[in-house]
Amino acid sequence: MAKSDTRRSFMKKAATGLAALSAAAMTNSTQAQSKKPNILLLFTDDQRFNTIRALGNWNIRTPNIDRMVSNGTVFTNAYIMGGTSGAVCMPSRAMLMTGRHIFHLENHGASIPMEHAIMPEHFRKSGYTTFGTGKQHNGRRAYARSFTTGGKIFFGGMSDHYKVPVNDFDPTGEYPKEGIYYKTNVHSSELFSSEAVNFLNGYQEDAPFFMYVAFTAPHDPRDMPQRYLDMYDPDNIPLSENFMPEHPFDNGELKIRDELLAPFPRTPKEIRKHLAAYYAMITHLDDQIGTVIQALKDSGRYDDTIIVLAGDNGLAVGCHGLMGKQNVYDHSVHVPLIFSGPGIPQGEKRDAFCYLLDIFPTLCELSGHEIPGTVDGQSLAPVIDGKKKAVRDSLFFLYKHYQRGLRNDRWKLIRYNVSGEHPVQLFDLKNDPNELENLAHDPKHSGTVTAMTSVMNEWIRYTGDKVDFKKADWGVGPMKEPWDK
C-alpha cells in the first residue's frame, strides 16, 4: 500500500473526518462573531498533569490555575507524543507550534522549514498582532516568522532562572547572538510575565492579538523566591505510589543529565526534597500566571480572549525510580491542557485522547480560521462543545530509538530496545493507573499484547516511524541529537 493510502486509511479509522469538523465549525458560536477573539497561550516547562490542586493534588497551591479549571474546559487525557531528543521539550514545542507529528518535523524540531505553517504565523497572516515572550527552542527564523512584537526572548532549552540570556524583539528577524543580555536578580517567571503585562497595558490596536507566553518553570534548576519554598515542608509531602529507588531495568536513558539530578538509589528523603522545590516553583509560576490574567482583565479584553494553558511535557521526580522525562510512562507524557473563554463551557472536563499538536487546529476552528494543510493534529472544538466524544481511540508514544508505547481506554503497552534486549510492559490502566504491575508475560493477556502491537504498528506506519519490531534492534540505529557532529 502506498504511503499516502496508508495515511488516508489510518486517518479514516483513528480520527474524525475533516469534513465533519468543517461542518461543526460553521455552527460554532465563536465563528459567528464579527470580531475575532484574542488568544492567550500560556505554556509551562516540565509541568506534569497532576500538579494542579483543582484536579486533585491537595498537596500543592495553584489558585490561579484552579480558577482557570473552574472557568473553562479541562482535557484530562492530554499528552505529548514523546521525544526523538533527550531535550524532549524541543520536539514537543515544535509539535505545538506546527500541529505536526514528531516524525513530520525537521531536525527534531530544532528548526521549522518554510513550508510548515506555524501557529502564530498563521494568525499573523490573518491580521492578528502576534506577541511572544519566553522560551523559544525551535530556532530564530521560526520566531521571526511568527511574531510582530515581543520581548525577553530566550533562544534555548534551559538556564539559570535568575540569569536568563534573553533578546529584545528584533524587527529585522536576525536576532544576532551579540544581542543577548542578562536580566539578573529577576526570576524567569517574573521576567516573562512582566513582559506580557507590559504588552497588555500598552496595546491600543483594533486588531485582535495572539499572545504566546512560554515559561521556563518549573524546569530545573529549581530556584524560586524563598517564601514559596517555605510553603512546603518536605516531610509532609507524600511520595507517589509508583516511587521506586531505581528503575527495574535499563530503559536506554538512565544516565542522561536529568537522571543525575538525584543520586542512585533514590531515597524517600531526597525525592521529597525535590518535590517540595518542584511544587514551590509551580506555586510561584501560578502567581505569575495570575498577574498576566489580571492584566488581561484590567485591559477590558478578558471576555473576548480564549486562554489556553498547557505544559510541554511531564516529569518523573522519583516515579519508577526516574527523575526526568526521557520515558513514556504517564508521569512524563501526560500534561495539563485547559481552554477557557468565549464559547467554551465552564467547569467541565473532557476525557478525549488528545495531543499538544491538536491545539493549533482547535484554535483555528474556535476563532473561525482555516486549518493549514500541513497540520496533522485534530481540532478539539467539537469535543469542547459536546458534539463529539473523541477524535482518536488510541495514543502513540515514543522515546528516541529506545521506547515505543501505546495506550487506549484500558491498556498501556510499552516496548523497549536497549543493547539487544527487548523488555515488554503491559499495564491495566483501569486497575493500575500508576503502571506498577506488568502483565505482559501473563498468558491470559497475550492476545492483548498482540492486538496492541498491531495498533502500534499502524501508528508507526502513519507517523513515518522507521521502527520494525521484527528486525534486530528494530532496524534503526541510534538517533543523533541536533547538536551531534
Image (spheres, rainbow, N blue to C red):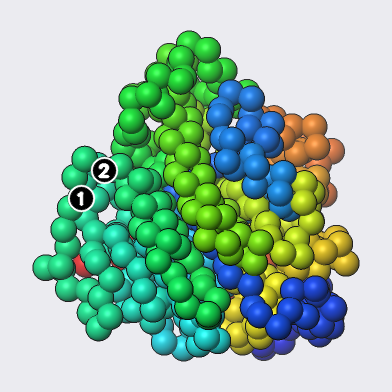
Residue 5 position in % (x across, y down): 72, 87
> How far is mark 2 from mark 1, CA to CA?
6 Å
Residue 252 shown left or right of residue 342 in the figure: left
Residue at the spot 85% in from the left edge and 78% down from the top edge = 27
Residue 57 position in % (x across, y down): 64, 29
Q: Quadrant of residue 50?
A: top right
Q: Secondary structure at mark 1?
A: loop
Q: Quadrant of residue 143?
A: bottom left
Nearest the camera: 254 or 223? 223
Few, some or many C-alpha atoms within 10 Å of disc 2 (few <14, some 14-19, many ≥20)? some
Kind of residue sitting beneath label 1: Lys
Check whether the beta carbons of the residues at disc 2 and disc 1 lie within 8 A of each other.
Answer: yes
Nearest the camera: 128 or 78? 128
Q: Looking at the figure, which quarter contains the N terminus?
A: bottom right
Residue 289 shown left or right of residue 455 in the figure: left
Residue at the spot 51% in from the left edge and 45% down from the top edge = 290
Q: Is residue 338 above or below residue 151?
A: above
The residue under label 2 is 186
Q: Is residue 468 above or below residue 31?
A: above
The residue under label 1 is 183
